[in-house]
Amino acid sequence: MSGRSGPFWDAVEGRSPLPRAAATLGLEFLDADVENGTIELAFTATDDFTNPSGNVLGAFLAAMLYDTVGPALLATLRPDQFQSTLELKASFLRPVRPGRIFGRGRVVHRDGDVAHLEASLLDADEAIIATATATARIIDLDRAAAAP
């Protein structure tokens, strides 16, 4: 993936820090297939993410799903583009304990400046623990900066 640039790739390749929310989730970049619009990530759910019964709160899982669908699209964009999530629908399939959680995301369809995305979170045994679909708008950073 070397040689790519833009906000996403600059963070992945260490030229800029990860966004603080992604760092809080323990986001780790594993792989991306830019041509096919897929990405693989890992997160580290800590005990700080749990409810009184010891399971990871759905809000943290939703944040991990959000940080999977967004980068699936971001990895495919030009350096002068970013994305804004318009809608995210999450489904939680089973309880999750703290530990390593894997995210797989993909661009399902892209039409102009709108993209439809999906993601899954998996545990260490590759059991799906949560899924999401999302819609995002692609933003031209130069145009957004020039807007009044």
Image (cartoon, helix red, strand yellow):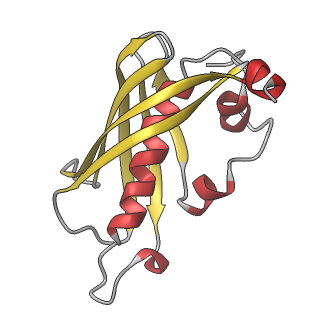
Residue 11: x and y in percent read: 70, 38
- 145 in relation to 94, above or below: above
- Residue 7: image quadrant is top right
Say which quadrant the C terminus sits in.
top right
Q: Is residue 57 left or right of residue 71?
A: left
Q: Residue at x 42, y 19 (%)?
A: 37
- 58 in relation to 75, above or below: below
Say which quadrant the N terminus sits in.
top right
Residue 4: x and y in percent read: 69, 17
- Number of callouts in the render? 0
Residue 47: x and y in percent read: 44, 79
The outermost residue toward the bottom is 52
Residue 49: x and y in percent read: 44, 74
Q: Is residue 76 left or right of residue 91?
A: right
- 22 in relation to 49, above or below: above
- Residue 20: image quadrant is bottom right
Q: Residue at x 29, y 76 (%)?
A: 55
- Residue 39: image quadrant is top left
Q: Residue at x 55, y 35 (%)?
A: 84
In the image, 131 versus 102, the foreground residue is: 131
In the image, 17 versus 141, the foreground residue is: 141
The outermost residue toward the front is 148
Q: Residue at x 17, y 63 (%)?
A: 94
